[in-house]
Amino acid sequence: MGTNMLSSKCSSFSYFSARRIALSIDVPKIKVTKISTARLPNRSLVAELDYLHKYIPTTTTTHTKEDPYYSKINTDGSTTSGTSTPNSMEEVKLRLIMEVVADRIEMHKNIGAQRDNWNRLLMTSVNMITLSASAMVGLAAASPSGAPIVALKVSSTILYMAATGLILVMNKIQPSQLAEEQRNAARLFKQLHGELRTRLSLGNPSENDVEEAMEKVLALDGAYPLPLLGSMLEKLPRTVEPAVWWPRQKQRSRRKEELGGKLKGKNGWDARSEGEMRKIGMILRKKDMAEYLRLGKQVLNFNKVLAVSGPLLSGLAALGSCFLGSVSSSWPVMVGVIGGALASVVNTLEHGGQVGMVFEMYRANCGFFKLMEESIELNITEEDPHKRENGELFEIKVALQLGRSLSELRQFAAAVSSSHEERDFEEFASKLF
């Protein structure tokens, strides 16, 4: 009994102790509230806002020394101070033109690949058609008279006529030349895109920069049109002229920002550099341009001969297949078989060899030299040296465009000056082409 009393006292003691501990702990009540989360915008809306943000002039916040407690935090964690300056509208316009130029690059790349496929597919199709028709003429000559010879005769005539039409179309549009035009356009638009990016990195663009960029875009659009009908360049012209993809060049004053603030003296020009550039421009005009015009004329004449020979041979083959079996002579078979084989050879030589592409390459190279010669002439004829391009930078640009180092360029100009007759000077200015 004593044991039971002792156990009941211990249990009651532990009960009151646990209750006292529980009362001494003050647990705050947690009020559960409903948390509302805002819906995130979808990707299209974010992309649209980001697109619009590129064209809205933004304000880059910097701060002055009078307000040392309010500073801008850069991406690297540092702080800067200054004043608030909005982006200029000219910079926004140049960025818009850059996007248009980037779109032009993709357009010309895609269309150039498409027209290169045209050249391959049309050439292969025409060759298969002419060879199939030639084989039919040979089979018809070996077959006895009757229904088989009539079927082979009609089939070969239809195939030859179709091949003649396709050859005429190919010779008119010159798919290999079309593809080369689009490749040149894509390269030149990439070059213009890089120029605009460099101009934006220099800062403070002007309205003249915007107008100049728009003129260059429109000049490239006119030099390398996209459509085939209406504005397509003449593929077999009467005379060979250099390709011109730039607007009329005009002088404009160079700002200090473009030259790092160095507008002292003669802007990098002296009598030696002017004489060297004058000699180089003369050699470009009399040697390099003249040579590529001569080569372009030879390729053009060769292409004209091939353009006439292909449909003429296939047409004669179609005529021979028409008279197959009608006369006792063997000349229809000879004309039908040999004419088809020769037409296939001529078509492969013209379009497989991409003679039109070679002609366009010579035109573009000649245009490149013409642009260099005009740029040199524009700079050395300007009396005010500060309105020219910087002489040192211009010399580096000319040397690299001609594939020479500065020392080689100066040695070349000295060799031209020391020669008795510039016309008899054998070396070309360019080492690239």
Image (spheres, helix red, strand yellow):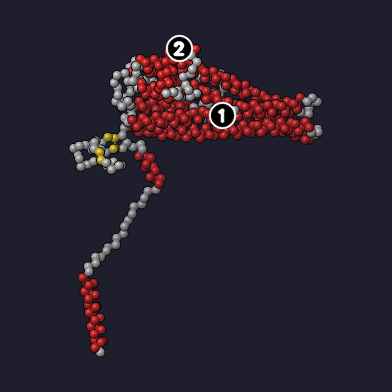
Report the residue that reaches farthest toward the top. 420
Residue at numbered disc 2: 419
Going by the numbered disc 1, the residue's amino acid type is Ser
Report the residue that reaches farthest toward the bottom. 1
Residue 367 visible here:
no
Instruction: Residue 266: name its quadrant.
Output: top left
Q: Residue at x 34, y 16 (%)?
A: 270
Q: Secondary structure at mark 2?
A: loop
Q: Secondary structure at mark 1?
A: helix
Q: Is residue 84 left or right of residue 248?
A: left
Q: Is residue 262 left or right of residue 423?
A: left
Mark nearer the N terminus (2 vs 1) = 1
The answer to whether 391 is drawn above or below residue 128 in the figure is: above
For the residue carrying disc 2, how many other residues have a C-alpha within 10 Å: few (<14), some (14-19), or many (20+)? few
Q: Position of residue 283 (x, y in %)?
A: 46, 16
> Which quarter of the rendering shows the N terminus?
bottom left
The answer to whether 226 is drawn above or below residue 33 in the figure is: above
For the residue carrying disc 1, how many other residues have a C-alpha within 10 Å: few (<14), some (14-19), or many (20+)? many
Q: Residue at x 43, y 12 (%)?
A: 418
Q: How far apart in space, not on screen, are marks 2 and 1 (Cα)?
A: 42 Å
Going by the numbered disc 2, the residue's amino acid type is Ser
Q: Choose between 380 and 140: the one closer to the eye.
A: 380
Q: Position of residue 66 (x, y in %)?
A: 18, 37
Q: Residue at x 27, y 41 (%)?
A: 78
Q: What is the total number of numbered labels drawn onto the structure image?
A: 2
Q: Position of residue 76 (x, y in %)?
A: 30, 42
Instruction: Residue 398: name its quadrant.
Output: top left
Instruction: Residue 269: name its quadrant.
Output: top left
Residue 59 visible here:
yes
Residue at numbered disc 1: 176
